[in-house]
Amino acid sequence: MHVLQIAWEYPPHIVGGLGRHVAELVPALAGHDVRVTVIAPRLREGALAEVCDGVEVRRINAPDMPWADYPSFVSATNHVLAQAACALREELGPFDLIHAHDWLATEAAATLKHQWRIPLVATIHATERGRGRGMLHGPAAQRINELEWRLAYEAWRVIVCSHFMAQQLGDYFQTPLDKIDVVPNGVNIGGTPFRDADHWLSFRRRYVADDERMVFHVGRIVYEKGLHVLLDAWPIVTSRIRARLVIAGMGETLDALKAQAAALGIAAQVDFAGFIANEDRDRLYHAADLAIFPSLYEPFGIVALEALANACPVIVSNAGGLAEVVQHGVTGLVVPADSPRALADAITAALSRPDMARSRAAAALREVREYYTWPRIAHATKTVYEQVMGAWHNDSWGKG
């Protein structure tokens, strides 16, 4: 089986969970005897053509459109991607199936589906309406929503990462639930990033004093991640326990969060660490006493899964798929979204009983090792492919 995956993000260009998902899924599929070719826009450095982990990767230069809004740029880039895919088909031979990731690949995927008369599988990682908490704010959001609907409509089957996302597609796009497959994200299990106790202590002291507890968050700094809720909770936390908050990542609300911390009088207790490499992210998970993910909207929560894979105790909100990843009181703590008081109470409880927090983290690590591995996710994805190919072979559409 030869699958063409169309993705907006592929290493070295990774912005969020979509890029990380594709980067890990594709080589895992190759390990399950699925021939995969990836085509993606070249939005950062990276060779135009290369073979990585047994996967053929082609990056296409995007058109230069500094004047265009984002949906228009994506549309023009999709046109270039579709043209390049046709040339790639002449070079590498026919594809059996197309797998498109999110609205960013809709137009190219739908064009190729009908031109080649082969089935399309879609993974929808998030929705614009979900990010807007049920609303579409402006013409660009409306266009994105329409492309999401089209992708769900054109796909023979739709993969989502959580039951929450399956319900969203049913509510927003009237996608039949029996057309949707829930396949969670996976994660690579973290190792021990420190050589010895002195190495661990030296790293931890970069961020906190020996008598302080460290609470950590990493991710894109955008409104839906709920970091303003975490800052509102922090004065309550520090009135009860000596702790310091480390926030890593970059994004559009970073300056607003810094201003909020200053206005709350907690700027000295909050370290905005900016962009960090994956190696330092894992070190922070191992050095921290607690990781917090207080999202207002979260289709799955791959960063929480990464924390669990590094045996870090976690607290998450009950937004979206986070409550499917973390079992309250068993593998972490789950609090109501957008509630600073509930979040502060949970942080205090976890920091006050580190033995219980570490016990939950150990249970979470056992679950991650059993359930959230990329070979398992690749096998589930291949099963979807096989189901679609079986239906296609018994259908007259592909033979027209």
Image (cartoon, helix red, strand yellow):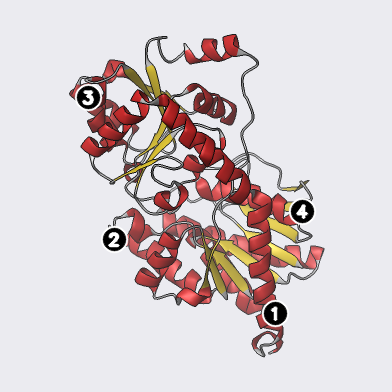
- C-alpha separation, residue under disc 2 versus residue under disc 1: 36 Å
Residue 305 position (above or below residue 279): below
Which residue lies under the disc numbered 2?
134
Identity, as a three-letter code, of the amino acid under mark 3? Pro
Q: Is residue 136 visible?
A: yes
User: Which one is earlier in the sequence, the residue at label 1 or at label 3?
Assistant: 3
Residue tagged 1 = 390
Q: Which residue is mark 4?
A: 31
What is the spatial separation of the Cα atoms under label 3 and label 2, in whole angstroms? Answer: 31 Å
For the N terminus, the quadrant is: bottom right
Above or below: residue 264 compared with residue 100 = above
Q: Amino acid at mark 4?
A: Gly
Residue at x 30% of width, y 55% of height: 132
Residue 263 x %, y %: 19, 24
Mark 4 burial class by Cα count in 10 Å: few <14, some 14-19, many 20+ = some
- As helix, strand or loop, the secondary structure at mark 1 comes to helix
Q: Earlier in the sequence, mark 4 or mark 2?
A: 4
Indicate which disc, 3 or 2, sits on the residue closer to the N terminus.
Answer: 2
User: CA–CA distance between discs 4 and 2?
Assistant: 39 Å
Residue 115 percent across, percent down from the top left: 64, 77
Q: For the residues marked 1 and 4, what is the alpha-carbon distance in whole angstroms?
A: 21 Å
Query: Mark 2 falls on what kind of element?
Result: loop
Between circles 2 and 1, the one closer to the viewer is 1
Residue at 51 percent across and 47 percent down: it is 17
Name the N-terminal-most of marks 1 and 4.
4
Which residue does the numbered mark 3 point to in the structure image? 235
Q: Is residue 239 above or below residue 153?
A: above
Amino acid at dot 2: Gly
